[in-house]
Image: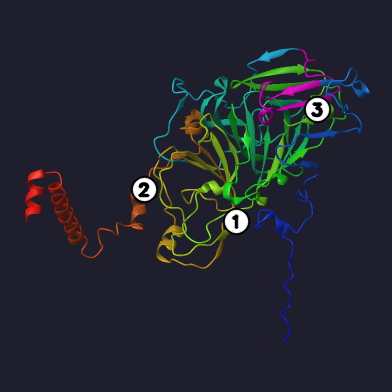
Amino acid sequence: MSAPPMQERKPVKDLQKVFHYTDTMTRKPTRDNDPYEYLAGFGSRHQSEVIPGTLPAGQNNPQEVRFGLYTEGLTYSAFAAPRHANFSTYMYRVRPAAAHNGYKANIPHKADIENCFLTLNPKVATLAEQGEWAPFPLPKEDEKIDFVDGLHTLGGSGDPNLREGIALYVFMINTDMDHRAFCNTDGDFLIVAQLGNLDIQTELGKLFLQPGEICVIPRGIRFAVRLGPGHSVARGYITEIWGSRWELPDLGPLGGHGLANPRDFLHPVAYIDENLHEDWSIVNKANGLYNAIEQDHTPFDLVAWHGNVVPYKYDLTKFSSQNATSIDHTDPSVNCVLTAASRDPVTPLADFLWFGPRWDVASNTFRLPYFHRNSATEFLASLYGNGLGRSDDFLPGGGSVEISHTPHGNFSDAYVWEMRNQVNEPRKILEDQMTVMIESSRTFLFTEYARSGCGTFKDQGTDPKVWDALPDKFSAYPNIQEILKQVKADNEARRERLETFYDDDRLAQLVRQ
């Protein structure tokens, strides 16, 4: 008997159609159209140089840096922070950042920035119900909007001036940042690409970001956002954290590997602009306000650098998912890509979670998420595909939110089908789609832009009609009223028996009997 013919695997090149990055059958750590090289590994001290031999050996600040460069240090933590929490980068550049022509405060812009999320701020408010946004509006064709002008705050909690809290943003752009860079002095930006490719230049090198990828720009790093080749518009999401930093979650019983693996995080290599002496503007966000530094030289003039305050990117299609393999739906913590600690040692400030293609394998259980009232605030965003929103109107480029302890769950046709057609066979779920979620221990307040200014928000109060599909089956259960009466009678008889043990006279009489 001859063996069956081997099935030949064929590479999948559309990253929005892969089940996992390995379906591409590539040997490269980046997508085919990514033009840049990277340094791999999360949490390491990296180094890179445009000209070999530029980095000083055995010291950080030599008397004379090679090629007449200047040493500039960037600290991210306290000088005396423990070694595991000490973060800094040394840069060797043509001119130091201190060489500029002064600041301009409160520069004009078209963005909607709000960073004070305290109840005393009348410009922010809570949401009483679940909320949902249709796709956030893209810029009009006759209006040029770059990253500085296209940034809009949705909501958050805390205040950057207190070094504690979180904020959510969306950005919609249709033009490059031209001779101006952005510097966030408040916190770290976690950027999620949803529509269009982004070519992001940072002081330490370049990152190419596509839908289904994320990048983190640490606080204090200057960067410029430009549209990728062939793209005229882009949209995405940003999570900003204050007083914390993104880390990989501990794996516990999973062991040494799983979820987002450290080797899949990619950092840029050193890059220097060709035109060094041109007029530039550096837009700083400080405590939620824009100011600008004017200078006659590019901020992207590093010839070499070394340190651990470095931007990085990650491809979400590489996520190594974990799931239930016997019974019961697993908590979404198994989908955590990055986490940011809070001052409470057992409760993170925020988790960034992934919901993408994976196997659904479990038996004798209801596989979908049960109805719940989580302590966390949850913001969901669909990057592509059908997404995991709470209504059929949930489309890529929009979002939905449930505030802490808001009762919620699934009312979809798929949920009803699952309820009526329990099956045990393994199956692939969430194919050809990608959804991300920001989960925070904080109760959010939302901006006027989010509540009405963007024009796509609506409260999602529960429509009672959904219960036509999820009826009260308990009340229709055969003889349920008689069962309840019997339970009540049994409980009364039990209490009567127990009362005997608290009454000495009755107990003595019982013993005599």
Indicate whether 27 appears above or below 421.
above
The answer to whether residue 194 is magenta is no
Picture quarter with the N terminus? bottom right
Q: Earlier in the sequence, mark 2 or mark 1?
A: 1
Q: Which badge, 3 or 1, is on the more N-terminal residue?
A: 3
Q: Are marks 2 and 1 in contact (CB under 8 Å)?
A: no
CA separation in Å, label 3 and label 1: 38 Å
**Drawn side of residue 238 relative to residue 345, left or right:** right
Q: Nearer the viewer, mark 3 or mark 1?
A: 1
Residue 463: numbered disc: 2
Q: What percent of the width, then of the height, locates residue 311? A: 72, 34
Q: Residue furthest bottom?
A: 1
Of 331 and 352, nearer the camera is 331
Q: Residue 239 — which label?
A: none
> Is label 2 or label 1 in front?
1
Q: Which residue is mark 3?
A: 300
Q: Amino acid at mark 2?
A: Asp
Q: Mark 1 — residue?
A: 357
Q: Residue at x 72, y 72 (%)?
A: 7
Q: Quadrant of residue 122?
A: top left
- Tell me if mark 3 has few (under 14), some (14-19) or many (20+) residues whose alpha carbon lies within 10 angstroms of its own: many
Is residue 68 in view from this perspective?
yes
